[in-house]
Image (spheres, rainbow, N blue to C red):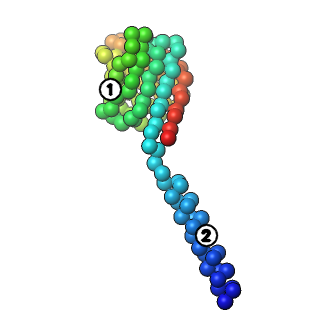
Amino acid sequence: MLKITHSLNRINSITLLLLSAILCSCFPERFRHEKYDCSQSIGGIKTIVFNKTEAGEFAKITTINGEEEASITQIDNQTAILKYENRQLKVNRQTGGVTLTHAAKYQSAICKKTVFTM
């Protein structure tokens, strides 16, 4: 009888441990704030901030003149492409490299990436 009780306790403990591990690993990210600090002020842009990383959403751009929005036209884990005024911004989400294209001219810089998640 004692042996059966010990086996049941052990099975219950293992089940509880497995269930806890599964539940903890499945919680989705509720909030993500991805920021690129371009202290070199590429084309007047100081920072680029993504809160929603989906095509059709907007990124917040801080310039020397204030805050503006840029449309996210394409995005994946590696690259984000934004339309800002009549310019295109290409952000390498892995390295922080930003390329600004305006007509036939382009500028590039490496920005400092920070990510805050909850």
Q: CA distance from mark 1 to mark 2?
A: 49 Å
Does 52 sit above or below residue 61? below
Q: Position of residue 77 (x, y in %)?
A: 46, 37
Mark 1 residue crowding within 10 angstroms, few (<14) / some (14–19) / many (20+): some
Which residue extends farthest right?
A: 2
Does 36 sit above or below residue 53? above
- Which residue is at a point 35% across and 19% down the rendered structure image? 68
Q: Position of residue 86 (x, y in %)?
A: 30, 15
Tag of residue 14:
2
The one nearer the camera, 87 or 113, is 113
- Which residue is at a point 44% across and 26% down the rendered structure image? 49
Disc 1: which residue:
71
Confirm whether residue 107 shows in the render: no
Q: Quadrant of residue 9?
A: bottom right
For discs 1 and 2, the disc positioned in front in the rendered view = 2
Q: Amino acid at mark 2?
A: Ile
- Which residue is at a point 42% across and 30% down the rendered structure image? 50
